[in-house]
Structure formats: structure tokens, C-alpha cells
Amino acid sequence: FKKVDCLTPLRTSHCPRKHNVSIMERKALKELQSNPKIIIKQSDKGGTIIVMNTTDYVKEAMRQLSNTTFYQVLSSNPTERFVSGRYCILNDALANNWITEKQFDFLKNDFPTIPVLYLLPKIHKSLINPPWRPIISSNESLLEPLSQFVDCHIRDC
């Protein structure tokens, strides 16, 4: 059988795309996105797009991060220590046949990213000076594969 790339005609097609915004609106959006003085985010609920002053956003992030009830400053990055500790645990699990080789490979994540904090304004609570919801994005982080693994087993995948 001959391998067929069915996407090539789509990639080389010269069919015009239909946009839901005009060329001028797209240009304006690109200019807004490239402006370092503003940040564009979705609101916490409702999906409304919010344009805000970068200084105010950073000030709020620093205010939240300085709350020692929820956050603490670390003297060093513990990721390497966590990676090696997790690797030992996974090796034990593999040696005891608690996980398969395939599961081991899925769970090991040799090059994790550090989770990132971002804030979403809660404009459904107040339009003027709204409270902010902190979000920690853990995509490709050290424990993301483990989270998926546990979730799958809880749901009995």
C-alpha cells in the first residue's frame, strides 16, 4: 500500500479563509497583543475579554504572592530533588510490578516545566476593582502525568 498524505491538498489549497473579524480589527488586535503596557485576559466567568494595565496586574500578582498563608518564598528550585525522588518511587513501583514499563515511561517526565501563576479578574463580582482568581497552570509539570494516571484509574479507564 502507498502511504497517502490526505492533508497536503488542504495545506496547499488556496481557498480563502473566512474570518469573523475584519482585516483592520485583526491588525488592531495584534497591536494590542504586542503592547507591553497592557495584558489581555479572559474574565473568570462568562469568557469576557478584559484589557488591563500591566502595572496593576503585576501589582495584584505580587500582593497575592506575598500572602504567606498561601505562598512561601523558596531559597532554591526544588524540581531536581523532586524529579530524583519521584524517579526512585517509580523504580520501586516498576520493580514490584505495581506499574508496567509503559506506565513507568508515561509517568517519568524527565524534563518537567515549572508551573506558572496567572490571574483572572472576577468581573461577575465587581466591574470596578474586581477581586482576582489565582490560577496555577501545571501543564507539562512534574506531577501532571501522575495526575492524569490517578484520574484515569479513579474513572476506571
Image (cartoon, rainbow, N blue to C red):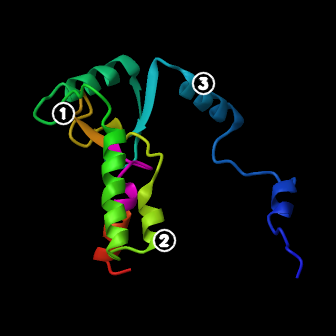
Q: Residues within 10 Å of mark 3 (few under 14, many from 20)?
A: few
5 shown above or below 37: below
Residue 115, numbered label: none
Q: Nearer the viewer, mark 3 or mark 2?
A: 2
Residue with the mark numbered 2: 102
Element carrying mark 3: helix
Q: Quadrant of residue 78?
A: top left
Q: Residue furthest left?
A: 69
Work out whether mark 1 precedes mark 2 in sequence or the reverse, and give the earlier one: 1
Residue with the mark numbered 1: 71
Q: What amino acid is labelled 1 in the image?
A: Tyr
**Depth order, front residue of 30/116:** 116
Task: Give the percent coordinates (x, y) of residue 46.
Answer: 35, 49
Residue with the mark numbered 3: 31
Work out whether mark 3 precedes mark 2 in sequence or the reverse, and give the earlier one: 3
Q: Nearer the viewer, mark 1 or mark 3?
A: 1
Work out whether mark 1 precedes mark 3 in sequence or the reverse, and give the earlier one: 3
Q: Residues within 10 Å of mark 2 (few under 14, many from 20)?
A: few
Task: Give the percent coordinates (x, y) of residue 45.
Answer: 31, 48
* Quadrant placement of the C terminus: bottom left
Q: What amino acid is labelled 3 in the image?
A: Glu
Element carrying mark 2: helix
Q: Residue at x 81, y 61 (%)?
A: 10
**Depth order, front residue of 61/130:** 61
Q: Is residue 72 left or right of residue 85?
A: left
Element carrying mark 1: loop
Q: CA distance from mark 1 to mark 2?
A: 36 Å
Q: Are marks 1 and 2 in contact (CB under 8 Å)?
A: no
Q: Which residues are magenta?
A: 136-146
Q: Residue at x 35, y 40 (%)?
A: 79
